[in-house]
Image (tube, rainbow, N blue to C red):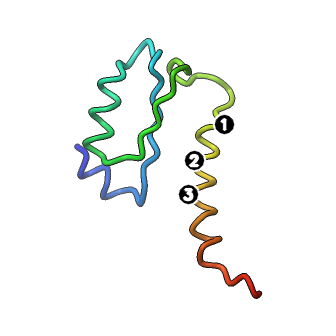
């Protein structure tokens, strides 16, 4: 499972809440190990059915903006 997922993604940010009522944290850890994802364990969040998810936005922006900033020429 993990290899086929990794082939289709340049990177994987995976979030799991310890208080998820549907998926046990151990299952999230198992998937993270199989996919070699960047695993984020949050103590609270349930099954992430909220309208806002600032941790996800932050992780995506970091992935997209940090490499661009590292490769930019500060003189331009």
| Helix, strand or loop at mark 3 | helix
Looking at the image, tell me whether mark 1 or mark 2 is earlier in sequence order. 1
**Quarter that holds the N terminus:** top left
Where does label 2 land, which residue? Answer: 59
Mark 2 surroundings within 10 Å by alpha-carbon count, few (fewer than 14), some (14 through 19), many (20 or more) = some
Describe residue 35's horizontal placement relative to residue 20 as left or right: left
Q: Which residue is mark 1?
A: 54
- Cα gap from disc 1 to disc 3, whole angstroms: 14 Å
Q: Which mark is residue 24?
A: none
Mark 3 lies on residue: 63
Marks 3 and 2 close (CB-CB < 8 Å): yes
Q: Residue at x 46, y 31 (%)?
A: 41
Secondary element at tag 2 = helix
Count neighbours of disc 3 (C-alpha within 10 A) and say few if under 14, some if 14 to 19, many if 20 or more: some
Q: Answer above or below: position of 59 versus 69.
A: above
Quadrant assignment for the C terminus: bottom right
Q: Is residue 70 left or right of residue 40?
A: right
x and y percentages locating residue 24 in the rendered image: 35, 18
**Residue at figure coordinates x 60%, y 55% from the top left:** 62
List x then y, in percent, for residue 55: 61, 38
């Amino acid at each position: 499972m993990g290899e086929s997922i990794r082939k289709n993604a340049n990177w994987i940010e995976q979030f799991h809440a310890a208080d998820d009522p549907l998926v046990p944290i151990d299952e999230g850890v198992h998937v993270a190990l199989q996919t070699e994802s960047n695993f984020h364990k949050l103590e609270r969040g349930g099954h992430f059915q909220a309208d806002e998810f600032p941790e996800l936005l932050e992780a995506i922006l970091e992935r997209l903006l940090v490499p661009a900033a590292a490769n930019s020429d500060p003189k331009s």
